[in-house]
Image: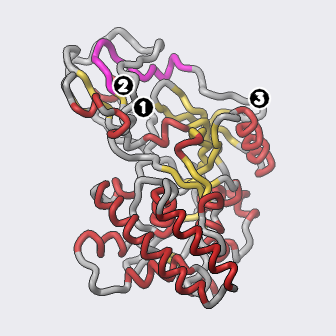
Amino acid sequence: MEKITYDDPRIEYPAFYNIYPIMNERSASGTIDPVAKFDDRALWLDEQYGRVITAQNSAVYGSSNKLPYYKTYDRFKVVDYVRVPFRKIPIFEANEFAQIDALYTKLKHDEPGYQVLLRGQTTVYSLHREEDENMFLFGENTPKEPSFHPSFLRAKFDEYFMYALWHSQTAMLLNDIGVDLKSLLNESQYKEYKIDEYKIKNSAHFTPIALGFAQHYGLPSVGLDLTDNLKVAAWFASHTLPIDDLGITNPTSIIDFGKSTIFFFRCPLDTVFSYDAIKPKHLTNTRPDRQKAWFGHCGWGMAKNQLASYLICGIRIDIRILNLFDDNYANHLFPSRETDLVLDFFLNMKENKRNKGEVERALKRIYHLDKKTRS
């Protein structure tokens, strides 16, 4: 939380700084007990969600023991919950994959004005705030507040540097892939690729596609991997990707499923883009293709944990989910350098010894499957 003044320029331009435009929203389930640290004559900016608040009382976002679950379904038992502003998000238990699929179908039906997307995680990461801040916002010392911070924050990169790096890398990537495709496509197909390349570079799609390429290959970004494919989300909820110093990973199925969760997000339609909808024609077999990727800015400016505010619910899975995957599924999700022209481009950039400083540090995070995994 940051103490700010009423003449702070960020308040005057909320869209530029990703600040929620309605100030001082509060939950009816809060308390009238103030928290001493928070001066009621000042404004307070919660940098996790871009919320501007005055300190009139505590539990601004609602008290967990007074809030109902955001969603309930008769077929699903609630086994845990997490907290976001104004909502208590249920974590359900599922006995079989068909149940999860049925829930996903229902959520999409219930949210026609939104895009319901998925993210699988082997654990639930939590935000860390001071106790008095938790008391002010949630009325308790240790609320179960999930963290969906994007990778640039976790790796301590400057946000504006990352924007510049995505755009420069993606512009070169699309050009270099065009050179490769010229020998692989017929004249008509190659012309279609070049038309799409020009359109992407000169349209609003350039930023989301740059974000998506960066995120899916390990380059730090302001996004997180999202998908509309339940099997893909289930794989990421049940496998770890340990990455060594050379950027090589050998995916491993987890043993402890105690916190393994598939999260469901209700995303505003103007904040996310399907990779299939915006990719250039005839660029195939990339990671975003195989992982049914969706792109979106989910943690930038003064709302670092914005994706959490889109949460609908979570599903806790168990070891039986591993029966979905054959031995080759990791190879399917992570095609090889020889197959994936985007991976080949990024690895060439990573291997370029002329890169220095923050560029070199960012490119070192690009990763790929161990060849042993493919054997």
Q: Earlier in the sequence, mark 3 or mark 2?
A: 3
Task: Relative to 99, say whether 278 is above or below.
Answer: below
Q: Is the magenta stretch mostly helix, strand or loop?
A: loop
> Is 238 left, or right, of 33 in this rendering?
right
Residue picked out by circle 1? 143
Q: Which residue is drawn at 21% across and 22% down?
A: 6
> Is 64 left, or right, of 130 in this rendering?
right
Q: Quadrant of the N terminus?
A: top left
Three-letter code, disc 2: Leu
Residue picked out by circle 2? 137
Q: Residue at x 60, y 27 (%)?
A: 70
Q: What span is in magenta?
A: 52-67
Q: In which quarter of the image is residue 144?
A: top left
Q: Are marks 2 and 1 in contact (CB under 8 Å)?
A: yes
Crowding around mark 2 (Cα neighbors within 10 Å: few <14, some 14 to 19, many 20+) is many
Q: Whole-Å distance between the Cαs marked 3 and 2?
A: 31 Å
